[in-house]
Amino acid sequence: MKKLRTIYLAGGCFWGLEKFMENITGVVETRVGYANGNKEKPTYKEVCTGRTGFAETVKVVYDPGVISLEALLIAFYNVIDPTSVNRQGPDVGSQYRSGIYYTNSDDLPVIEHVTTMTFRRLGGRKPLATEIKPLRNFYDAEEYHQKYLDKNPGGYCHIPEWKMGYSQDRELRAS
């Protein structure tokens, strides 16, 4: 087994994105939280004001021997609208922006490559709004947010149910 890697992904309400990511073979851990804001230990209520600068984010720990970063990012871009500014589905606000936050600069070429492929796949007519930045900070969300859709089957999710199955698609496997 290769050393585990971590990437932080923001794509609207973190409940659905966490569920989607945890279903991908090779993802060994997920945690929801708040990334790249300007306050120590924010609460959900504070983040929802839009004044803290945080994005609802999923920490994704994965085994690169099973799933590549490229495959994870392709899956991510397939369940969000990367052209939408501060919005995913019906969720509106800066905390719902899309973002890829990395802790290892070696990941940047892969992130940029997949982002360019996504832009081309979408026809290149509309700019992508997904921010790509180094992770400055990440705080776990309150415990009731962790594995929310497992605890609340049928709970709110902005990702359509038919897209949840994409996470098990063959094309995601590492070669």
Image (cartoon, grey):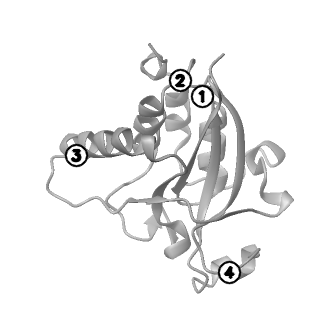
Instruction: Tell me, yes or no, whether the two marked residues, 1 and 2, touch with CB atoms within 8 Å.
Output: yes
Disc marking residue 24:
1
Mark found first going from the N terminus, 1 or 4 = 1
Q: Nearer the viewer, mark 1 or mark 2?
A: 2
Q: Quadrant of the N terminus?
A: top right
Q: Dot 2: what SS?
A: loop
Residue receiving disc 4: 39
Residue receiving disc 3: 122
Q: CA distance from mark 1 to mark 2?
A: 8 Å
Disc marking residue 105:
none
- Residue 2, position in %: x, y? 62, 20
How many residues crowd around disc 2 within 10 Å: few (fewer than 14), some, or many (20 or more)?
Answer: some
Residue receiving disc 2: 67
Q: Nearer the viewer, mark 1 or mark 4?
A: 4
Q: CA distance from mark 1 to mark 4?
A: 32 Å
63 to the left or right of 98: right
Residue at image point 62% right, 26% down: 63
Q: Amino acid at mark 2?
A: Ile
